[in-house]
Image: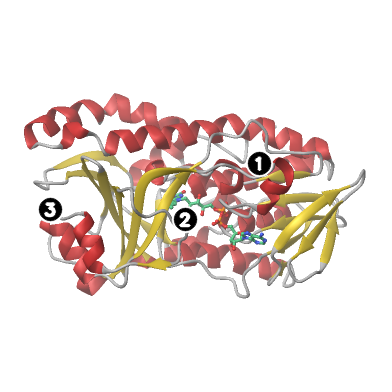
Amino acid sequence: MPAFAGMTLWTSGMAANKNVAIVGGGIGGLAAALALIRHGVEVEVYEQAPELKELGAGVQISSNGTRVLYALGLGKAIEKVGVIVAGKEIRLWSTGQTWKLFDLGAVSVERYGFPYMMFHRGDLHGALLQAIRRERPEAVRLNRKCVGLSQSADGVEMRFESGEKASAPLVIGADGVQSRVRAALFGADRPEFTGIVCWRVLVPRERVPAGIKLDVGTNWVGPGGHVVHYPVRGGELLNLVGLLERDDWRVESWTVQGSKDEFSNDFRNWHPDIHAMIRAGETPYKWALFSRPPMPAWTKRRVTLLGDACHSMLPMLAQGAVMALEDGMVLARCIEKYGIAPAALQRYETVRRERANRAVAGSADNARRFHNPDLANAEGAEAYVTREWQEEKVKQRYEWLFTYDATGVAI
Ligand SMILES: Cc1cc2nc3c(=O)[nH]c(=O)nc-3n(C[C@H](O)[C@H](O)[C@H](O)COP(=O)(O)OP(=O)(O)OC[C@H]3O[C@@H](n4cnc5c(N)ncnc54)[C@H](O)[C@@H]3O)c2cc1C
């Protein structure tokens, strides 16, 4: 039996008689809400959207994230929809030459206790939402776009676009990269365009070109860009993401459609396999990647931040959503231990901030590594890949992430 299968659901004796408000019902906000419910805390989630759904894209959750999902009681639900791949491979943009990056599958469970899983974002989000609704059908409130908040000695008042107001003794801003809660606490941020444009598309399994492996995650690397693909939704779909250094598109939105021709043109000299996947895919979407410097603080008295609201990162380490899952678990444990009080939020920030900021830096390092000019020609690339993806170096880059235990770390 795998080590994680026997894990018991997290419960506590704390009375469910006080509430915490969460602004934002994305993966981070819902994970925090479920963790709080499991710790006996009343919770309300205020989400701006009129209905709850995630966009059509994939998300990889490494063992440090699936550990949290199992502890939240979601083991069966995620095993139904997630895909456990055998490992990850690196491929060269021009020739398609392939190198092993690391083994996953049973190796992840053996080494870290939990699997590395690939999801359609909607499936993971749906699993969190269903679990919350089973416990508290009314916990998630839609059409509530938070536009500001103010604090007094004993509570926080949130204001919504509709003119409504709500209050709670503690508020968690899980409202993503363009967080209004962060702006209310610390003022407007100054995001910097990274010069990278990101494409995403889903390819139905029956249209995946021959020669594309469906049992591994693949990372094509090349000068000025990289392409990632992996199976999601029990293998029914392939998630394809392409990132390219390009200066003429600066819209930070997940919902802008592009065209297959434009996507293909961005990767015009790349391997035919990539173009075959783009052609086989549905309509692609594009998004400009912005970076924000690590924040020196996340908390002001009765309000704190979580997930992309306080540590958005480039996607090159595949840890943004995973960090949000870890945040939610640690936050719930701190509230259980220190009570519904500012001290709990301060402790949460102290436990989490350095690690999350290290992941922000690690993601930026990987961007330089994946897009390196040394990958331009095949001979130089061989030496570069052998050096940069040596087993010891890979361990240094990932081991500290995968071994972390948000359910047991000292708080
Ligand atoms: C191309 C790409 C690939 C990625 N791949 C991975 C990966 O493989 N693994 C991984 O771990 N991470 C990955 N990430 C990062 C991951 O997507 C994010 O870190 C994660 O979605 C953050 O979750 P969140 O809940 O903090 O924010 P979000 O997912 O942005 O959710 C925020 C929620 O708040 C709501 N909201 C916003 N403003 C308001 C408001 N004012 N009032 C009320 N509600 C509001 C939004 O509607 C939304 O529901 C990737 C990112 C990109 C761009």
Quadrant housing the C terminus = top right
CA separation in Å, label 2 and label 3: 28 Å
Query: Depth check: 140 or 392 in front?
Result: 140
Disc 2, SS: loop
| Residue, disc 1 | 330
Q: Residues within 10 Å of mark 1 (few under 14, many from 20)?
A: many
Q: Which callout, 2 or 3, points to the residue nearer the camera?
A: 2
Residue picked out by circle 3: 271
Q: In terms of image quadrants, where is residue 368?
A: top left
Instruction: Check residue 57 in the rendering and tell me which mark sits there, or answer none.
Output: none
Residue 383 in percent (x, y) is at 13, 27
Q: Which residue is mark 2?
A: 252
* Disc 1 element: helix
Measured as percent of width and height from the top left, residue 218 is found at: 25, 50
In the picture shown, does residue 70 fall above or below 344?
below
Locate residue 245 relative to residue 54 in the image: left or right: left
Spatial separation of the CA atoms under disc 1 and disc 3:
43 Å
